[in-house]
Image: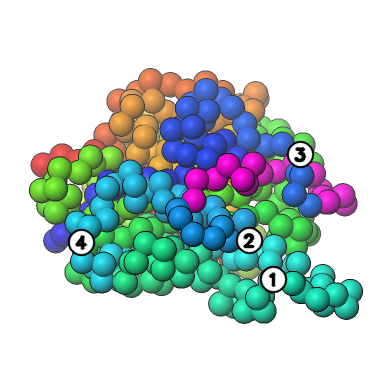
């Protein structure tokens, strides 16, 4: 079976506009959660979020800058990942795919268009096409055009497991010979409609996000993009590419339980983690670190703890299990791909990012949550977990590139 490795990464989020800045600030214990400035957040449960700023500082490829922030995020992260990998020119363009995921697509463009129509004003330069279902493909279409990538270009939308699911799809495309390289990841932008809906679902805390902490009361959402350039391993090694790690297993499932409420037994998360380990042919004892989804909501963090313990057994108590969401905020479709980037860098640098705002232990979340301060650790194999509204789950198994 063809093996799949990561040779390029790009990140845009509230902690930084490039991978080095994101990683440095994450390990330093910084938080990118600040007051919302892009629109009037009055009336929302929390007027803070993980906002990317300034938009003008994003490093975009040549060509007109797209108006929509979500598309800008994806374009900037794609540019960084492709440049990092140095892959352009090493493959026929028809053998390079683009697999993106998003929850809300160009929601800000839709809001602006709808507002103009309701007030009787001309919509200006907002194309009507961006205000319908095709808006989900805006970013993937533009990236494929700008970089002339003619391979498969599917779009996924699996709530907050979307970013990880896109990476898993890209891995499978290379394994099956559908492509030799794939640019994969998730992107989303904050918008009033998105945050209003998430507020109604009561997932947002009125104070701080506190993953695994006893006093957690909900999550805080953010925005951005995380992109990974995946390649067939032998070709990557032959061209002398720097390899961050191998994507050796992935799985996606759903809880088949409820449209919003989590499965209180954690069965879906346990199944997806077990399936990803089986796909990777990795034993639970080989996992050195779990990058948890851990949103800071009351029920999810307990359920995830239960699932991790069920699958990893005694190993769950011997390894660090941290969440980066109090630093980045919950970046929606970008969450899983940003967490995959953090996991690969944890392997590279031997440093596990911290779980911020952890003050009071919860006996139901009794794993080593790496409270507040990054930790030096030997990391050879990581399980990265994602889950979301609708009961969608995804898991990635990442490990060092070894013979």
Mark 4 and mark 3 in contact? Answer it, CB < 8 Å: no
The image position of residue 291, as x and y in percent, is 44, 40
Q: Quarter holding the N terminus?
A: bottom left
Residue at image location 56% in from the left, 49% down from the top? 224
N-term-proximal mark, 4 vs 2: 2
> Magenta part mainly helix, strand or loop?
loop
Q: Which residue is mark 3?
A: 35
From the viewer's perspective, is 42 left or right of 388? right
Hey, which residue is sitting farthest front in the picture? Answer: 63
Q: Which one is earlier in the sequence, the residue at label 1 or at label 4?
A: 4
Mark 4 and mark 3: Cα distance apart in space: 44 Å
Residues at circles 3 and 1 in contact by the CB criterion of under 8 Å: no
Q: Are marks 2 and 1 in contact (CB under 8 Å)?
A: yes
Q: From the image, tell me which residue sits under label 4.
A: 91
Sooner in the amino-acid sequence: mark 2 or mark 1: 2
Q: SS for tag 4? A: loop
Position of residue 241 relative to residue 71, above or below, is above
Checking the image for residue 125, the label placed there is 1
Few, some or many residues within 10 Å of mark 3 (<14, 14–19, 20+): few
Q: CA distance from mark 2 to mark 1?
A: 9 Å
| Rendered image coloring scheme | rainbow
What range is drawn magenta here? 40-60
The quarter of the picture where residue 171 lies is bottom left
Measured along the vertical axis of the image, is residue 139 above or below residue 381?
Answer: below
Cα separation between marks 1 and 4: 36 Å
Which of the numbered marks, if any, corresponds to residue 183? Answer: none
- Label 2 belongs to which residue? 67
Residue at 88% in and 78% down: 120
Q: Secondary structure at mark 2?
A: loop
């Amino acid at each position: 079976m063809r093996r799949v490795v990561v040779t390029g990464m790009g990140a845009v989020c509230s902690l930084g506009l490039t991978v080095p800045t994101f990683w440095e600030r994450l390990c330093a214990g910084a938080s990118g959660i600040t007051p919302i400035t892009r629109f009037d957040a009055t009336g929302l449960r929390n007027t803070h979020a993980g906002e990317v700023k300034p938009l003008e500082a994003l490093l975009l490829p040549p060509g007109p800058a797209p108006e929509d922030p979500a598309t800008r995020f994806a374009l900037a992260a794609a540019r960084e990942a492709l440049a990092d990998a140095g892959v352009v020119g090493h493959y026929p363009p028809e053998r390079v795919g683009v697999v993106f995921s998003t929850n809300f697509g160009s929601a800000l463009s839709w809001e602006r268009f709808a507002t103009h129509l309701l007030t009787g004003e001309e919509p200006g330069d907002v194309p009507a096409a961006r205000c319908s279902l095709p808006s989900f493909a805006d970013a993937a279409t533009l990236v494929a055009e700008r970089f002339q990538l003619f391979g498969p270009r599917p779009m996924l939308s699996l709530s907050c497991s979307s970013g990880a699911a896109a990476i898993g799809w890209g891995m499978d495309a290379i394994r099956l010979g559908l492509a030799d390289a794939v640019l994969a990841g998730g992107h989303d932008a904050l918008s009033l409609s998105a945050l209003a809906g998430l507020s109604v679902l009561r997932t947002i805390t009125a104070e701080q996000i506190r993953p695994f902490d006893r006093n957690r009361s909900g999550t805080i959402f953010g925005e951005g993009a995380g992109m990974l350039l995946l390649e067939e391993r032998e070709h990557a090694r032959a061209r002398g590419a720097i390899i961050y790690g191998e994507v050796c297993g992935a799985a996606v499932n759903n809880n088949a339980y409820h449209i919003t409420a989590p499965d209180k037994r954690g069965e879906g998360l346990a199944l997806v983690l077990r399936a990803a380990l089986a796909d990777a042919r990795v034993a639970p004892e080989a996992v050195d670190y779990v990058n948890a989804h851990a949103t800071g909501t009351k029920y999810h963090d307990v359920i995830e703890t239960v699932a991790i313990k069920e699958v990893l057994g005694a190993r769950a108590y011997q390894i660090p299990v941290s969440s980066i969401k109090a630093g980045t905020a919950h970046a929606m479709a970008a969450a899983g791909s940003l967490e995959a980037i953090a996991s690969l860098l944890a392997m590279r640098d031997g440093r596990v990012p911290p779980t911020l705002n952890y003050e009071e232990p919860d006996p139901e979340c009794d794993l080593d949550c790496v409270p507040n301060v990054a930790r030096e650790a030997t990391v050879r194999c990581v399980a990265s977990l994602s889950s979301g509204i609708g009961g969608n789950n995804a898991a990635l198994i990442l490990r060092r590139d070894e013979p």
